[in-house]
Image: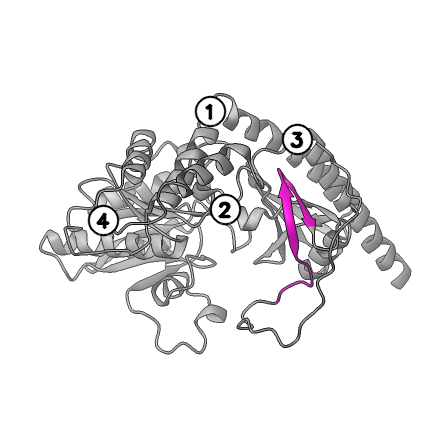
Amino acid sequence: MNTSLKAVPGGTKVEPNSHSAMMPTYARAELAFERGEGPWLVSTEGRRYLDFAAGIAVNVAGHAHPHLVKALTEQANKLWHVSNVYRIPEGEKLARRLTDLTFADVVFFTNSGAEALECAIKTARKYHAANGNPERYRLITFEGAFHGRTLATIAAGGQKKYLEGFGPAVEGFDQVPFGDHKAVEAAIGPETAGILVEPIQGEGGVRVLPPQCLRGLRELCDKHGILLVLDEVQSGVGRTGKLFAHEWSGITPDIMAVAKGIGGGFPIGACLATREAAKGMVAGSHGSTYGGNPLATTVGNAVLDLVTAPGFLENVSRTSLLLTQRLAELKDRFPGVIADVRGTGLLMGLKMVVPNTEFVAALRDEGLLTVGAGENVIRLIPPLIIGEAEVRAATEAIERAATKFAAKASTAA
């Protein structure tokens, strides 16, 4: 595989368009891509970029992986979509595989992470209603969380920048400081249905919840008869070197939302639950037109083929260790640019001294794609198939950018 960051000939330039018909909800870079190969993307202008954004932790198998392409095209030639009025064999197969691999007994398929979280929230509330306690509908959530862009999930996240202008926040969420066990326990009351938490806050700045904290939350839920609901939309499907991040703590949740990596780039999400936790989710209580259709679940099965193959997760852990070591070296060399290295597996973050938006742009100029996060952090969330060559290319790009920022600061001084 070509690991250079040089341009390739034959590209077509995409001109900036200030009159785009797209709703302007994204601050898009003036960059578009026409094809990809593994962890690499080729722009419409013919330049190669190393993709350490992966569609924001989505493309776990990189771009145009032969196994995923084959599965999708074969299914596309047979059947695209039918309603959930009928049984869907591909979906039933994926659900069975997910339950065999996890704590869960049942699965509901969605099109996105936000929808998976909506299902998880509804499932937690419905559980208590089915037990005769409909007043128990509130979920304890954490400052800095990001659970999606629906009205319920922005309320769960509680971040002002996502709530502003959308009217009264959806009722039923009580926020506490991240990792504050005493605050969580104090927030539990007669209306509490459960605790909703990301094992790793991605959007919130790649903040890892220590295993002992997750174990403590499980104990609180057991003590008070409430449900532990995990958001593993970003941290799941092999990203940390385990199939799901909570496995490092040795606990299991009652409900878990999954998306992003499970489709490897094809839109699919899932809400996983124990049969007990999902006892209220009976026929007619929830639904989705597209969720779990033949195309999506066929690709989901193909992704699981790869991620559960012998040695795959071990390679993620080995590559993560190498990346972490290289990033730590760069932090030590450029203390005026990089303040800290955080994260686990291939969900890594650089806490920046310089503005993260400027450094993301500088890395893009160097041929490396990354994405920002809260707390002035840059996320490094590459495809899980990368190896030593890609780690070297990425850290060399970071070194080049950091050198320029350090030189600029020295000149200004």
Mark whose residue sits in front, 4 or 3: 3
**Magenta segment includes 51:** no
Q: Residue at x 43, y 29 (%)?
A: 305
Question: What is the C-alpha distance between the residues marked 2 and 1?
Answer: 19 Å
The range drawn in magenta is 27-42
Mark whose residue sits in front, 2 or 1: 2
Q: Which mark is residue 226?
A: 4
Identity, as a three-letter code, of the amino acid under mark 4 = Ile
User: Label 4: how many residues lie within 10 Å, few (<14), some (14-19) or many (20+)?
Assistant: many
Indicate which disc, 3 or 1, sits on the residue closer to the N terminus: 1
Indicate which disc, 4 or 2, sits on the residue closer to the N terminus: 4
Q: Which mark is residue 322?
A: 3
User: Label 3: how many residues lie within 10 Å, few (<14), some (14-19) or many (20+)?
Assistant: some
Identity, as a three-letter code, of the amino acid under mark 3 = Leu
Question: What is the C-alpha distance between the residues marked 4 and 2?
Answer: 34 Å
On screen, residue 249 above or below 355: above
Question: What is the C-alpha distance between the residues marked 3 and 1?
Answer: 21 Å
